[in-house]
Image (cartoon, rainbow, N blue to C red):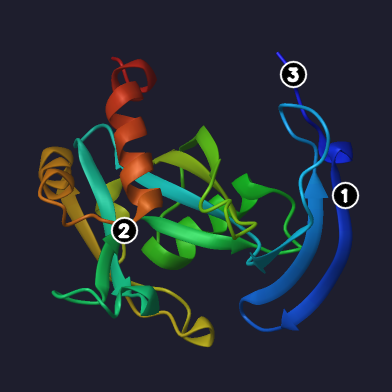
Amino acid sequence: MQTFKHADVEILERTLERRGFLSIFRYRLRHKLFAGGWSATFDRELMERGHAAVVIPYDPQRDQLVLLEQFRIGAMSDSTSPWLLEFVAGMIDASDVDAEAVAHRELFEEAGLRAQHMHYALSYYSSPGGCTEKISIYVAEVDSSEAATLGGLATENEDIRVHVLPRTDVEQLLEQGKINNAASVIGLQWLQLHRSRLFST
């Protein structure tokens, strides 16, 4: 099977279109084709958002999950509400050691929790057709009785309500479509697949 690498893409031009919370670049490029030869030259816009860590806080002793509720600008078109149910998440900055360090930090900042164990689940690109963001998901073993009521940093304009719910209730919310952001859906489904292996007694 033919495998392409970075060397099989030729970047002809890279132009900054906008710098901000979300920076956008325009690329002019071409790449090798499966059938042989090179593609025509074409343009693509790419949003450089950085990478993020997501944490699924799970209490195996009580079989409870810690879920967050917060405002998301991208959900303003939602017919119900732009306040979403999701799990702990944070951006990975240049100063961060790695994604797991971010997972521990965000778990405390957003939910008031410290992980007894942090299990790496998976990583994926959130929207590789136009965004560089890569998400790393972790499952944190926590004591849910220590969860905060409210979380987040005012300096980051975060206003988070923390919910502690039975795992089966959270799974029902997923089935009902009330958990509808990709990282939370993927992380929760990963936990459903691997929970018995990770937390067998």
Q: Amino acid at mark 1?
A: Glu
Which residue matches tag 1? 10
Q: Residues within 10 Å of mark 1 (few under 14, many from 20)?
A: some
Name the disc covering residue 86, or none. 2
Q: Is residue 157 visible?
A: yes
Q: Is residue 142 visible?
A: no
Q: Where is the C terminus found, in terms of image quarters?
A: top left
Contact (CB < 8 A) between labels 1 and 2? no
Which callout, 1 or 2, points at the residue further toward the start of the chain?
1
Q: Which mark is in front, 2 or 3?
A: 3
Q: Residues within 10 Å of mark 2 (few under 14, many from 20)?
A: many
Which callout, 2 or 3, points at the residue further toward the start of the chain?
3
Q: Quadrant of residue 130?
A: bottom right
Name the disc covering residue 144, or none. none
Q: Nearer the viewer, residue 187 or 116?
A: 187
For the residues labelled 1 and 2, the Cα–Cα distance comes to 39 Å
Which callout, 3 or 1, points at the residue further toward the start of the chain?
3
Tag 3 secondary structure: loop
